[in-house]
Amino acid sequence: MATIHPVILSGGSGTRLWPLSRAALPKQLLPLASDFSLLQDTVSRLSDMPEMAAPLMVCNVEHRFMIAEQMRQIGVDPHAIVLEPVGRNTAPAIAVAALMLSRNDPDALMLVLPADHLIGDITAFHAAIRTAAEAARNGHLATFGIVAATPETGYGYIRKGAPLADTEGTYGIEAFVEKPDQATARRYVDSGEYFWNSGMFLFRATDFLNELGTLRPDILDASRAALDAAKPDLDFVRLDPAAFEACPSESVDYAVMEHTRRAAVVPTDIAWNDIGAWSALWDVAEKDDRGNATRGDIMLENASNNLVRAETRMVAMLGVSDLVVVETADVVLVASRDQVQDVKKLVDRLKAEKRCEHLVHKQVYRPWGWYEGIDEGERFQVKRIMVKPGEKLSLQMHHHRAEHWIVVSGTARVTRDDEVELLTENQSTYIPLGTSHRLENPGKIDLHMIEVQSGTYLGEDDIVRFEDVYLRS
């Protein structure tokens, strides 16, 4: 049985699922449909296939520690985690992965999966993968076409061609079609000749690289240069920033699949959903007898067909229908369920107004743990800090602020210039402005602290790092 190498693309930002999905914590890293993140579910649904190798992850550099931690949580040791310095769409990301795999095995089969899709029928999905693998071994670039159950206008479509003689259950591709209007989508579905474009692929790495070299040699050359100049960074592979930034930003459909003569489609009926908007999550969620899908502390009275998610407090709804309500610590979204495709417009306004609610939550994750803003005012800021066992913050200094630390639970090792001390529950210390300092958790349980900052400037960029085990600049 030939080995298949999963390539997981995790570079998206998921702006249509704001305010839960944000730049620093995008939708693929969130538990939207289960107790695990979409990324974890994507990797875990391959675990019962013995032909699967360890996954190769391609992700945004800012998400590297969260992705590594989520893989550790489910007991997966990735083949590699490749860091993109900037987003360049799917063609360069796949090209880098193909180059890495082909260096060790010219015949390597690669299964390309976005990190943020839901698949309900795992058995049918595995069968489709094996069909696509057979097509790939026969030299085709296979994509998975989702059997179109409804006339969706939010998906691109694939028109199937003639059956392939060398691979049962696989067809040539007549055309890739952009997102249609409602009438056109209805015509596509009724014809039975069109499938939803899933954005999942399976092909030999060298076959893909040969086609890319013929059709878009500029993308191939830039991707190869970025990988050739890549540097190891802890457990990560950091692509060369200058070379990768010079690469054209292009989807794999536009760069290769729409133009190659080797494209093939495997029709699949796998209860697939790309969770492109809050309404899509309502479609697949479990609902009560009045059509409400809820998560969190929710109280409903005379309410129907709503999607309600509460992260930090109770949400009560009375006499309303067809709404999406998403509560986080700093934002509450209320939207008509048929308007949620336009959530991106709110995110664009936040960007234009230079606000931060589209970037980070109040709780911000770091490789050592997390911190959360509690209160702030003129010349002061209060945070909760959690440091995982065995982890440490960088040795650092601030030009504009002093800090008071109070241990709530756990044990803290505090370095302050040349002095080192241990603090336990209810003990505190003071870090004067301009003092080099470091916080560590030498214990076996999480360290929880309260930090009170005071000074003329309290921005996160007022950090001078002298030493950092995570190699951050």
Image (cartoon, rainbow, N blue to C red):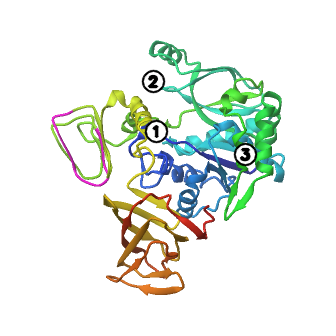
Rounded to the nearest whole Å, what is the CA distance between mark 3 and mark 2?
44 Å
Q: Residue at x 83, y 35 (%)?
A: 210
Q: Amino acid at mark 3?
A: Ala
Q: Are marks 1 and 3 in contact (CB under 8 Å)?
A: no
Rendering quarter of residue 130: top right
Residue drawn 53% across and 73% down?
A: 392
Question: Under tag 2, what secondary structure?
Answer: loop
Label 2, on which residue? 150
Dot 1 or dot 2, earlier in sequence: 1
Is 328 placed above or below 395 here?
above
Which mark, by number, is residue 321? none
| Magenta stretch in the rendered image | 307-320
Q: Closer to the N terminus: mark 1 or mark 3?
A: 1
**Secondary structure of the residue carrying numbered label 3:** helix
- Looking at the rendered structure, the secondary structure element under dot 1 is helix
348 lies above or below 180 = below
> Residue 304: where, in percent of width, then height?
22, 35
Q: Amino acid at mark 2?
A: Thr
Residue 15, numbered label: 1
Q: Which mark is residue 242?
A: 3
- Of labels 3 and 2, earlier in sequence is 2
Q: CA distance from mark 1 to mark 3?
A: 27 Å
Q: Are marks 1 and 2 in contact (CB under 8 Å)?
A: no
Q: CA distance from mark 1 to mark 2?
A: 24 Å
Could you tell me residue 18's position as x and y percent? Answer: 40, 41
Task: Please give left or right for residue 285 compared with residue 242 in the image.
Answer: left
Residue type at tag 1: Thr
